[in-house]
Image (spheres, helix red, strand yellow):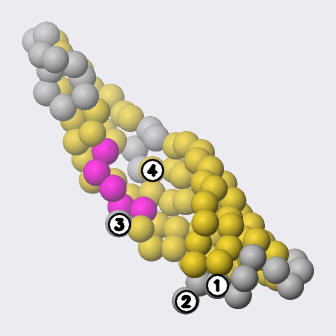
Amino acid sequence: MTASLSRGYALTSDLQGYIKLAWVNAVMTIDQGSNQSKISATVNGATAGLGFKQFWTPHWYGFIEANYVKMDTIKFNTPINGIPLNGNIDYSGYNAMVGIGYKF
């Protein structure tokens, strides 16, 4: 689940720049291999991004967007081959999207 807030600015009559902040809630799963159990946890995170929309008509537009996401740390305690293993898993990353949209 994601909830986001974005704020845009008209650079020209048909080009909009925007920033986006979002809260993310997702299930993260770590697969340890064929003979080991999977580690899963529901975690929260934050996303920040920026993008541009190029309007071709009053309703159709193309967009490009770049985002950074940082999720909460997962702490785990699991045996691997009978040996207890404790640790933390941190996740952060970048993504980029390019697409076509329709404004109602």
Q: Residues within 10 Å of mark 4 (few under 14, many from 20)?
A: many
State the CA–CA distance, disc 2 to disc 4: 32 Å
Q: Which residue is mark 1?
A: 59
With respect to residue 99, does 104 lie above or below? below
- Residue 98 position in % (x across, y down): 63, 56
Q: Secondary structure at mark 1?
A: loop
> Amino acid under label 3?
Met
Q: Secondary structure at mark 2?
A: loop
Residue 66 picture quarter: bottom right
Residue range highlighted in magenta: 24-28
| 38 on left or right of 103 | left
State the CA–CA distance, disc 1 to disc 4: 34 Å
Q: Which residue is mark 2?
A: 104
Q: Which residue is mark 4?
A: 71
**Along the line of sight, which residue is nearer the eye, 32 or 16?**
16
State the CA–CA distance, disc 4 to disc 3: 13 Å
User: Which one is earlier in the sequence, the residue at label 3 or at label 1?
Assistant: 3
The answer to whether marks 1 and 4 mark residues whose Cβ atoms lie closer than 8 Å is no
The answer to whether marks 1 and 2 mark residues whose Cβ atoms lie closer than 8 Å is yes
User: Which one is earlier in the sequence, the residue at label 1 or at label 2?
Assistant: 1
Badge nearest the viewer, 2 or 4: 2
